[in-house]
Amino acid sequence: MLSHYESRLAEVLGARLAAPFAGRVFVSPGPSGGPDEPTLLVGTARAEVLTADFGASRPQVVPGADDPRRVLRLRCDVLIEVRASTAGGRGERVSALDAVLYELDAPDLRDASALAAQGDPGFVLSRQAPVSVLTDPGTEPAGVLLSAEGWFWPPDTPGVTGVPISSAVVQAAVLPIALDPWPLNLRAGDAPVPLRVRMRTAAPVDSLAIRLRGNAAGQLTGGTPGPDGARIVPLTGDTAEFQYVPPAGATTDHLVIAVARPGPALGTELARFDVAVRP
C-alpha cells in the first residue's frame, strides 16, 4: 500500500526532474554506492488513519479493479530527502529543494493524476501538496515534506463479496392528503378553478403553504401571500380552499403542498400534484 505509493512517486519525480536529479529519485534508504551523485529519497514519515465519513465504511470500487475493495483512508506525511554529492554541498541541496518544490506544485501532482498507472496501483489519492521544507545550512538531512490523503489497499487482492440482495423491506409514514376535484381537466385560458386540499387525518397544522413549481405558468389565488411565491391558506376543519388560474398556453405546473410556518421559509412538504393544462 504505502510502499506502492512511495515507488510510484519516486518513479514520476525521477522522470520529470532535470539533471543532475533526473533518474536519481529512489525509495528510502536508496541504492548503495558512492556519494559522488546527488540523490533524492522518498519515504513515509507518518501515516494517520482517517475516520470514515458517514456511509463511507463500505467497500469501494478502485482503479484497476472491477470488484469492490476494502480500503484504508489515510493521511500521510512523506519526506523527499535530498542527499548532495560530496562536491555539491549546500548549493546542490538548495537546488534540489527548489526543483522538487516547483515540480510538486504542478497541478497534475497536486491532484495526483500524474501518479495514475495501468493495473491495480494499491492507492488512489484525493490530494497531495508540499507543506514545508526541512533544511539546515550546515548539515543534512534536507528535504521537502509532502502531505497526501487518499485510499490505500493491498494491490491485486480479491475483492469483497457478499450475498446478493434479493429483496428489501421499506417502511414509510404518509400523511393522507387529497386534492378535490381530481383528476383535473383544464384547458389554456379557462376561468379560475376552485380547488380544495383535504387532510384526511388529525394533524397539528393550522394552515398550508401552497405554491407552484416547474413552469409555474399558472397562478394561485386565495389566502394570503407567503414566502417563495406561496399562498398561505388556512385550514377550516380538514380543508383548505384556493383557486388555480390556468395560463394562456399549454403547460404542466407542479402544485406543492407544504406546512405553513412563521418566518421566511416554508415548512415540510406534504404532497405534490402535477397540473396539466391542454391547449
Image (cartoon, rainbow, N blue to C red):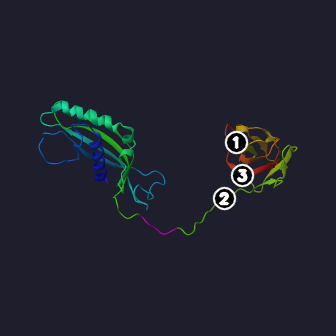
Secondary structure mainly formed by the magenta segment: loop
Q: Is residue 25 visible?
A: yes
Q: Which residue is mark 1?
A: 261
Please provide the residue range marked out in magenta.
160-164
What residue is rendered at 36% in x and 45% in y?
114
Q: Residue at x 36, y 37 (%)?
A: 106
Q: Earlier in the sequence, mark 2 or mark 3?
A: 2
Q: Which residue is mark 3?
A: 271
Of residues 238 and 40, the one drawn nearer to the viewer in this rendering: 40
Q: Position of residue 202 (x, y in %)?
A: 75, 55
Of circles 1 and 3, the one toward us is: 3
For the residues labelled 1 and 3, the Cα–Cα distance comes to: 16 Å
- Which comes before the other along the chain, label 1 or label 3? 1
What kind of element bears circle 2? Answer: loop
Given residues 88 and 73, the one toward you in this image is: 88
Q: Quadrant of residue 138?
A: top left
Q: Nearer the viewer, mark 2 or mark 3?
A: 3
Q: Residues within 10 Å of mark 1 (few under 14, many from 20)?
A: some
Q: Quadrant of residue 190?
A: top right
In the image, is residue 163 part of the stretch drawn in magenta? yes
Residue at 13 percent across and 39 percent down: it is 36
Query: Which residue is disc 2 drawn over?
Result: 173
Q: Give the x, y percent position of residue 1.
A: 32, 54
The 10 Å Cα crowd at callout 2, few under 14, some 14 to 19, many 20 or more, is few
The amino acid type, in three-letter code, at marker 2 is Ala
Q: Is 248 displayed left or right of 10 in the figure?
A: right
Q: Position of residue 232 (x, y in %)?
A: 76, 41
Between the residue at mark 2 and the residue at mark 3, the CA separation in whole angstroms equals: 13 Å
* Residue 134 appearing in the image: no
Above or below 156: residue 128? above
Secondary structure found at label 1: loop
